[in-house]
Image (cartoon, rainbow, N blue to C red):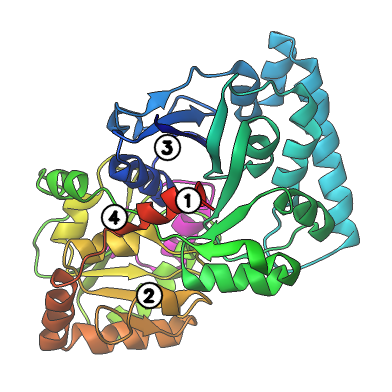
Amino acid sequence: MKKTILIFSHCMELGGVERSLLGLLDSIDYNYYGVDLCLMRHSGELMPYLNPKANLLPEIPQYASLAVPMASLIRSGQFGILCGRLQGKLAAQRFDKQHPCDKPSVTALTYSHNYTLHSMPQVSDKTYDLAIGFLTPHRFARERVKATKYAAWIHTDYTALSFDRATEIAMWNKYDAICGVSEQVSKGFQTTFPELAGKVQTIENILPKELIYKQADEPQNDMPSDGSAAILSVGRFCDAKNFDNVPDICRRLVADGLDVKWYLIGYGGYEPLIRQKIAEAGMQDRVIILGKKNNPYPYMRTCDLYVQPSRYEGKAVTVREAQLLGKPVVITNYATSGSQLEDGVDGVIVPMDNAGCAAGIAVLLRDPARMQQLSENCQKRDYTNSAEVEKIYALMED
């Protein structure tokens, strides 16, 4: 008889976490495991790439309503969820005011889920061997799914966040396993919540290799070969990715005599700030926002250098994708950078500050032989992590 797994996640919009979910679904042996996938919203550019062997459960209106404007909830008569979201928002504002911190806060998101939980129905009538909370809200995967074992995936560095510790502890304690996507993510979580250390293990992101290779062969017309060194960064336009500092880093490279163009693929709330920084740095012809791309891989294959200038990460899927395509990679020395690549072997780690970052990139761009060696080293390695699925199977055996 097949073991059964329920995977709970947000939606399939463009993002590294969503792409790693594709890889996980493709790696499962469906001869022995049955998988139900619950997405809060059936939306996003990556929906067509879901493995058809996984059973996509029908969208549940209550869960989908968490992403719509509150005014829409009034029109649809979902007053319980509306009240919960309002209560959560106000409670989070009070908490953040009482506990000021210069780190990004996830309290509003956590409280929104806590205060709307009472309005959320059971996801399914089944009882699963394993329920996986693949992405927030982890509380729903634990409280609205019946399962023998529960596992939550951690995709971010908790040492870089501000949160309500008591609320987080209460939720994580209900999980049997907490799975960090890198050793550094796992260690950061254990440092933050030492009382939960016994539940923590590492299960790396699994990449959909065949899809990446296939899509990388598609044409692109936005990165012309004009003699400039083409630098590429891919990710959401948000605080974590640090793209707002790219214009100043690029300005320093140009001032150092390098002919570069830096392309940004992504979308998000920081786009106006990034555009403002581009204008302030006078980099309108050097930093090019390509926007949202359903398929970033032709751009990765075309670029000369892939750079992830993040402030913090769990484990950047895009870095692994660029390495899979044999590109030289530069990342900043965020807290989890050591588990992202082997410095000097399959990538380079540079300082976080703009001057240091620019200097590190400049040294590499002026050394074509070293860039070629990095590329060759990447081509010799397996970045798919397909064997990690065995750890997921083991969660059901403990």
Q: Is residue 206 above or below residue 147?
A: below
Which of the two discs, 2 and 4, sits closer to the camera?
4
**Residue that carries the numbered disc 1 in the rendered image:** 271
Quarter of the image containing the N terminus?
top left
Q: Sequence-wise, which precedes: disc 3 or disc 1? A: 3
Horizontal arrangement in the rendering, residue 224 relative to residue 307 (left or right): left
Q: Position of residue 116 (x, y in %)?
A: 76, 30
Are the residues at dot 2 and dot 4 in contact (C-beta closer than 8 Å)? no
- Which residue is drawn at the image coordinates 64% and 43% (left, top)? 138
Residues at marks 4 and 1 touching, judged by CB atoms closer than 8 Å:
no
Residue 190 drawn at (x, y percent): 65, 71
Q: State the extent of the magenta-drawn residues as a range.
A: 267-289
Q: Residues within 10 Å of mark 4 (few under 14, many from 20)?
A: some
Which residue is painted at 16% across and 67% down in the image?
326
Using a 10 Å C-alpha cutoff, classify the residue at mark 1 as few (fewer than 14 neighbours), some (14 to 19) or many (20 or more).
some
Asked whether residue 263 appears in the rendered view, the answer is no
Query: In this figure, which residue is indicated by the disc labeled 3?
Result: 13
Rounded to the nearest whole Å, what is the CA distance between mark 2 and mark 4? 24 Å
Q: In the rendered view, tell whether residue 277 sits above or below residue 207.
A: below
N-terminal of the pair, mark 4 or mark 1, is 1
Disc 3 and disc 1: Cα gap in Å?
A: 17 Å
Vertically, is 140 above or below 392?
A: above
Which residue is tagged 2? 331
